[in-house]
């Protein structure tokens, strides 16, 4: 292992912790096409907050670069680029295939390319390998090899980190599977699990998030039903949760780079084989509709309190996809924002964890830095700062509505919750 040089391609929430872990033991190059990101990391600055300056600097064998020529002396490449969906909710493999093309142009005989990006089963061997072969002129499983080890990073989680979560590994040949497994076992304290094939490892990642998505969609559908009945969903879940085998999922917005995206990858593969998934896609439809439901519910509550809707002021507390984390990828708060605008409301968004420039670039939303008075306040993300906030100081009057989409606030101060 000591004679290898590892390149981590993509230095986001997944790639950076991996680069730091490998860079503490092996010669490692952290590569990203974003020159600003590379410059900041070289100074120990991580905007994702997954690694602090001390951690980065403690990885004494780690260097950073955005120059493809620096990849030429690497023989192990680990790909951690995003795998999003497009506007039609179909997999967008552009970053993955571009990364494969780049690696193909620089890799030499004996190289091992390991993918961590979430994909559908078969993607590594059917989509990525041909690109590697085309641009390298090398033959798969003769001149170079591949592995797949799905990422299990949980953004913002300081307990369940890279090294404390068991890692699934796989390789394109039995020997390479052992090589990949040994490589990860050297940095993962929780241990590894060697899958029998790359396709199995790819599928394991896809169903992890699809399972969670389906479970959340069930309780979200319950929330829609119980809202019509007039009972509190969380009261029902608390009662049902007294049984030992009841799964305690909570209703809410389902965004982020994994749960809100990965099921579409699995569905895409199924449909390409002639099977049209029912449960997976029905769950997606329910979860994708929750932002619109919340917006409509708040408007109804405002009308009931006599508020004139057009021009009324609403505050959304939070825009990141989860609490105490700056990650805004695939935020479903945006669905609430856009729906409220359609009703003619004046909407402000406040989030001390989000980067205002990124939010503007990604969603064309200008974050406010100092909230004023509002006719409706919606807790969309349960950041710690919001849980200790005096909501009364934000209300424009007794008619103001407070909606708690996270069931995190004192019930005495809210008009309704999800």
Image (cartoon, grey):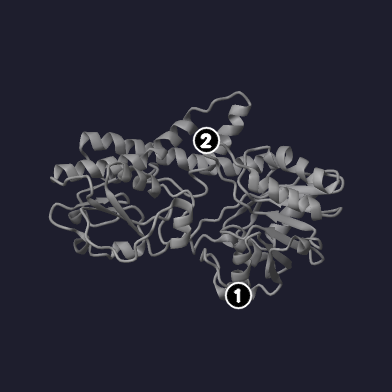
Q: In this view, does 44 lie to the left or right of 292?
A: right
Q: Based on the displayed image, in which of its 4 quarters is residue 356 positioned?
A: bottom left
**Residue at numbered disc 1:** 43
Residue 177 point in image, percent of width and height: 75, 49
Q: What residue is rendered at 73% in x and 40% in y?
A: 125
Disc 1 crowd, CA 10 A, few/some/many (<14, 14-19, 20+): few
Q: Which of 85 and 338 is in front in this view?
A: 338
Above or below 242: residue 187: below
Query: In 3D space, how far apart are the residues under numbered discs 2 and 1 (Cα atoms)?
Result: 39 Å
Quarter of the view holding residue 316: bottom left
Q: Which mark is residue 88?
A: 2
Given residues 157 and 19, the one toward you in this image is 19
The numbered mark at residue 195 is none
Looking at the picture, does residue 152 appear above or below residue 387?
Answer: above
Q: Which image quarter is the N terminus in?
A: bottom right
- Residue at 43 percent across and 34 percent down: it is 285
Q: Where is residue 375 in the image (x, y as percent from the top left)?
A: 20, 53
**Which element is circle 2 on?**
loop
């Amino acid at each position: 292992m000591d004679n290898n040089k590892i390149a981590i391609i993509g230095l986001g929430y997944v790639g950076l912790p991996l680069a730091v872990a490998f860079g503490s033991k092996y010669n490692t190059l952290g590569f990203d096409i974003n020159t600003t990101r590379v410059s900041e990391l070289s100074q120990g600055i991580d905007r994702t907050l997954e690694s602090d300056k001390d951690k980065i600097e403690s990885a004494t064998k780690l260097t950073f670069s955005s120059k493809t020529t620096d990849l030429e002396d690497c023989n192990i490449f680990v790909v951690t680029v995003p795998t999003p969906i497009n506007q039609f909710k179909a997999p967008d493999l552009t970053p993955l295939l571009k990364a494969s093309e780049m690696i193909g142009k620089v890799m030499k005989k004996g190289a091992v390319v390991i993918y961590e990006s979430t994909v559908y089963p078969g993607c590594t061997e059917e989509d990525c390998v041909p690109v590697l072969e085309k641009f390298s002129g090398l033959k798969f499983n003769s001149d170079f090899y591949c592995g797949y080890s799905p990422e299990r990073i949980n953004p913002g989680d300081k307990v369940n980190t890279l090294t404390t979560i068991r890692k699934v590994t796989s390789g394109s040949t039995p020997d390479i599977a052992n090589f990949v497994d040994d490589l990860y076992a050297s940095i993962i304290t929780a241990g590894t699990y060697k899958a029998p094939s790359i396709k199995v490892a790819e599928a394991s990642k896809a169903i992890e998030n699809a399972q969670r998505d389906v479970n959340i969609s069930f309780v979200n559908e319950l929330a829609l039903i119980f809202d019509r009945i007039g009972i509190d969903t969380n009261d029902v879940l608390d009662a049902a949760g007294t049984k030992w085998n009841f799964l305690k999922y909570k209703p809410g917005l389902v965004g982020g780079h994994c749960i809100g995206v990965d099921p579409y990858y699995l569905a895409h593969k199924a449909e390409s084989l002639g099977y049209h998934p029912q449960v997976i896609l029905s769950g997606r439809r329910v979860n994708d509709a929750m932002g619109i439901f919340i917006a409509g519910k708040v408007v109804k509550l405002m009308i009931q309190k006599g508020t004139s809707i057009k021009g009324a002021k609403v505050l959304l507390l939070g825009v990141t996809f989860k609490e105490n984390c700056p990650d805004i990828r695939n935020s479903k708060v945006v669905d609430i924002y856009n729906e409220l605008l359609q009703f003619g409301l004046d909407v402000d968004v406040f989030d001390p964890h989000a980067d205002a420039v990124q939010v503007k670039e990604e969603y064309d939303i200008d974050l406010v830095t100092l909230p004023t008075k509002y006719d409706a306040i919606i807790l969309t993300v349960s950041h710690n700062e919001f849980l200790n906030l005096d909501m009364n100081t934000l209300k424009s009057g007794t008619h103001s509505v407070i909606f708690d989409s996270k069931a995190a606030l004192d019930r005495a101060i809210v008009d309704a919750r999800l």
